[in-house]
Image (cartoon, grey):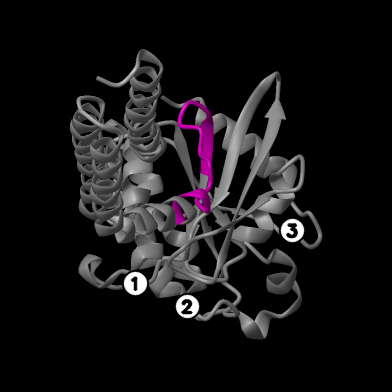
Amino acid sequence: NPPKMVKSKHKRQISSCAMKLDALTKELAVPLGKYVKGFPTASRLHPFDRALLHLTVGEDKYDRVLQRVDTARKKLLQAGKANAMRAGRSKSPREAAAALEEGTAVLENIYKKEEATMERLLYYTQQLRRLPVVDPRLDTFVLAGAPNVGKSSLVSALSSGQPEVCNYPFTTKTIKMGHFDFAGERYQVTDTPGLLRRPEEERNEMEGLTMAAIEHLDNATVIFVMDLTGECGTAVRDQCAVREELLEKFPDKARRWVDVFTKADLFDAERDFVDPDCDEAQHRAPDAIWISTKTEKNLGELMRRMLDAMERR
């Protein structure tokens, strides 16, 4: 029989092999557990955030990736525990070392099989971090309308500070989000992607974002922005059609709605640029306010109307 000192040394070597496997298992599995817990399931998200998730990476893809990562975590824990136990019960250091080597290979194989899934989760993380942080608890002014009607300039004019420039994963365009304070209350004001006159099924992700903001932000007041000068590239009749579509689709927003005609300075100075349908636009939106971010015409009055509309619950 080997002396007690040798037996003790062998036990330490066997125990060391088991501990190495246990440590490797935790090193691989614990971060995965944190990732899974750090990403809420789509069903737990606010409806607006859930809509952004759907437009950005796809709700089903997102949930599938999280499930696969969690499954990989469970497999690592199961295999690591089994092999660490096997190493710990070895009768000799050589047997324990073999169990360590085999167990390490099993863990590495499980991890490598899901390496693409880990990279996909990292990619989703990068995409989601690019999205704007909208606080659904704050009253929000959503600026909607056709492309190039002046929504972005209006966000800058209404914000008390420098608006945040948001880059969306599905476009090269940027969206501005600003804040301002009034009477001790804080408000959000956000630009949205331009809406074109076309069937719902033909709209792209950017237009889907605008519809999601109007539909899912319960505390939102819609500021519908129109350009009657003919410069934005969208005919006034088409802008009017989009306005009617939104009012019909979201009738509950009609009470908290402000119509705005932008670029009043160009309208006043260049009558030749006026779209022939502008009279129809003024007929459909008789209470619209003419503003100019360039000359600051009626910006104070617009702010008053926005706050009045916000109070209509």
Question: Is residue 135 within the magenta segment?
Answer: yes
Q: Which mark is residue 293?
A: 3
* Residue that mark 2 sits on: 234
Quadrant of the drawing holding the N terminus: top left
The residue nearer to you, when weighing 128 against 138, is: 128
Horizontal side of residue 60 vs 141, given as left or right: left
Residue type beneath disc 3 = Thr
Q: Residue furthest top?
A: 4
Question: Is residue 303 within the magenta segment?
Answer: no
Q: Tell me the crowding category of disc 2: few under 14, some 14 to 19, or many 20 or more residues within 10 angstroms, Cα based.
A: many
Residue type beneath disc 1 = Arg
Q: Magenta region: which residues?
A: 127-141
The relative height of residue 66 versus residue 114 in the rendered view (above or below) is: above
The residue lying at 25 percent from left, 44 percent from top is 98
> N-terminal of the two: label 1 or label 3?
1
Q: Quadrant of residue 183?
A: top right
The relative height of residue 215 versus residue 90 in the rendered view (above or below) is: below
Q: CA distance from mark 3 to mark 2?
A: 20 Å
Mark 3 and mark 1 in contact (Cβ < 8 Å)? no
Secondary structure mainly formed by the magenta segment: loop
* Residue that mark 1 sits on: 197
Q: Position of residue 65 (x, y in %)?
A: 26, 50
Q: CA distance from mark 1 to mark 3?
A: 26 Å
The relative height of residue 217 versus residue 55 in the rendered view (above or below) is: above
Q: CA distance from mark 1 to mark 2?
A: 9 Å
Horizontal side of residue 151 vs 32, given as left or right: right
Q: Tell me the crowding category of disc 1: few under 14, some 14 to 19, or many 20 or more residues within 10 angstroms, Cα based.
A: some
Q: Is residue 257 visible?
A: no
Mark 2 and mark 1 in contact (Cβ < 8 Å)? yes
